[in-house]
């Protein structure tokens, strides 16, 4: 296991393309300038000790030196001690609506981005709970199994978009049925699903699925995003709105938040509904609910000791830099005698 102490310094790798481009332009300029006064054969006689190989070799040394110095500044750390730690928490599955209606912009920047930010904010205040992620539209697909790796959770969360499922619609029942397969610990006393959606369910099976989930001991807390007034669904190309989704009659479709189905699902399963547009209200609600729940103790593997690895990279970088500085562009006599590079 490894981690980077200051990954910001990776941006310094951007110096390398600039360095290579500058070297190419300078060498090209030199060649043109020399040919204005003499030809190639006469240039060899005028500069018999000039090496054609060393300028490029010096560039390679300088590039390697910069690379090693950047890696040294980033300070990679390697885990050296794996320890089993015990935690107490609740298993939480986030079921996130990725149907096209979530592109409506009645909540800035749109319903889906609002949902992702809301889930990210909830993750930020979790400590020892396990999380899983489901994405759903007309069908549901697992994104992240139950885990304590919040970093992976954020990565999968950011990848959610409305194009990941070809079939469109909002099948709440598919998401709830799939969430029931995520809880593999029979001794877990609290199983929680946080369902984030605009509530536009086209399957009409959401209530039945909620009852099935409740029979498995799952409590569903629903968060509605969007407004009751609704908004059209934009069709974008390269980030620019070209038109809005229309029905078969050619009229612009207005998608509205449907609180009723979300409230019914929450009530049937022993959970509660909350307005997902108000982030702080949701965070306070989640915090209060999790505090009141019984926690399950479980074990997790974790690296608790890391060793810095920057020393070797910095040393290699400085050594290569010194070699590059003291390496002249003239031919080396013993190398010339070996004739490795056909330098006559």
Image (spheres, grey):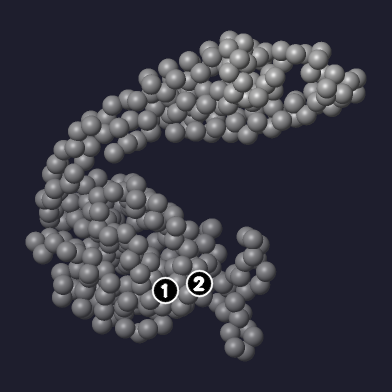
Q: Nearer the viewer, residue 183 or 211?
A: 183
Relative to 336, 310 lies left or right: left
> Is 29 on the left or on the right of 323, as rendered?
right
Q: Is residue 77 above or below residue 198?
A: above
Whether residue 249 is visible: yes
Residue 259 is at least partly visible in this image: no
Q: Nearer the viewer, residue 327 or 52?
A: 52
Residue at 34%, 35% (x, y): give it.
Answer: 3
Q: Which mark is residue 137?
A: 1
- Mark 2 lies on residue: 100
Kindly report the distance in space between the C-alpha atoms of the residues bearing marks 2 and 1.
Answer: 8 Å
Q: Relative to residue 1, is residue 212 depicted above or below?
A: below
Quarter of the picture containing the C terminus is top right
Measured from the top left, where is residue 26 in percent x and y? 75, 25
Position in image of residue 37 (x %, y %): 90, 20
Q: Quadrant of residue 92?
A: bottom left
User: In this image, 342 relative to 139: left or right?
Assistant: right
Q: Position of residue 242 (x, y in %)?
A: 67, 69
Residue located at (52% from left, 23% from top): 65
Q: Residue at x 28, y 72 (%)?
A: 178
In which quadrant is the N terminus drawn?
Answer: top left
Query: Does residue 316 sit above or below 270 in this rendering?
Result: above
The earlier-in-sequence mark between 2 and 1 is 2
Disc number for residue 250 = none
Mark 1 neighbour density, 10 Å: few (under 14) some (14–19) many (20 or more): many
The answer to whether the residue labelled 2 contacts the one labelled 1, judged by CB atoms less than 8 Å apart, is: yes
Q: Is disc 2 placed on a helix, strand or loop?
A: helix
On screen, residue 203 versus residue 256, left or right, reads: left
Q: Is residue 15 above or below residue 194?
A: above
* Residue sitting at the far bottom: 249
Q: Is label 1 in a helix, a strand or a loop?
A: loop
């Amino acid at each position: 296991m490894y981690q980077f102490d200051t990954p910001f310094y990776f941006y310094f790798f951007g110096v390398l393309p600039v360095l290579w481009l500058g070297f190419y332009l300078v060498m090209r300029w030199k060649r043109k300038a020399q040919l204005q006064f003499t030809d190639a054969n006469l240039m060899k006689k005028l500069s018999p000790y000039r090496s054609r190989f060393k300028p490029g070799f010096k560039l390679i040394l300088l590039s390697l030196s910069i690379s090693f110095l950047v890696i040294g500044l980033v300070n990679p750390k390697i885990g050296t001690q794996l320890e089993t730690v015990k935690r107490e928490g609740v298993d939480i599955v986030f079921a996130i609506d990725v149907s096209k209606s979530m592109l409506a912009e009645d909540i800035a920047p749109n319903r889906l981005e609002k949902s992702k930010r809301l889930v990210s904010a909830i993750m930020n205040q979790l400590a020892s709970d396990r999380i899983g992620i489901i994405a759903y539209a007309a069908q549901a697909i697992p994104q992240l199994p139950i885990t304590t790796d919040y970093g992976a959770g954020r990565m999968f969360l950011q990848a959610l978009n409305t194009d990941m499922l070809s079939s469109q619609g909002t099948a709440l029942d598919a998401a709830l049925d799939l969430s029931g397969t995520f809880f593999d610990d029979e001794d877990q006393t609290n199983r929680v699903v946080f369902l984030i959606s605009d509530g536009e369910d086209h399957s009409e099976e959401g209530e039945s699925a909620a009852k099935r989930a409740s029979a498995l001991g799952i409590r569903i807390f629903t968060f509605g995003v969007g407004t009751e007034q609704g908004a059209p669904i934009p069709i974008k190309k390269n980030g620019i709105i070209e038109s809005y989704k229309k029905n078969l009659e050619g009229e612009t479709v207005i998608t509205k938040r449907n609180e009723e189905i979300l409230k019914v699902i929450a009530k049937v399963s022993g959970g509660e509904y909350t307005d997902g547009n108000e982030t702080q209200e949701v965070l306070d609600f989640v915090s209060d609910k999790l505090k009141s729940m019984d926690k399950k103790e479980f074990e997790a593997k974790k690296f608790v000791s890391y060793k810095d690895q920057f020393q070797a990279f910095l040393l290699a970088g400085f050594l290569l830099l010194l070699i590059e500085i003291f390496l002249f562009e003239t031919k080396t006599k013993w190398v010339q005698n070996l004739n490795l590079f056909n330098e006559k």
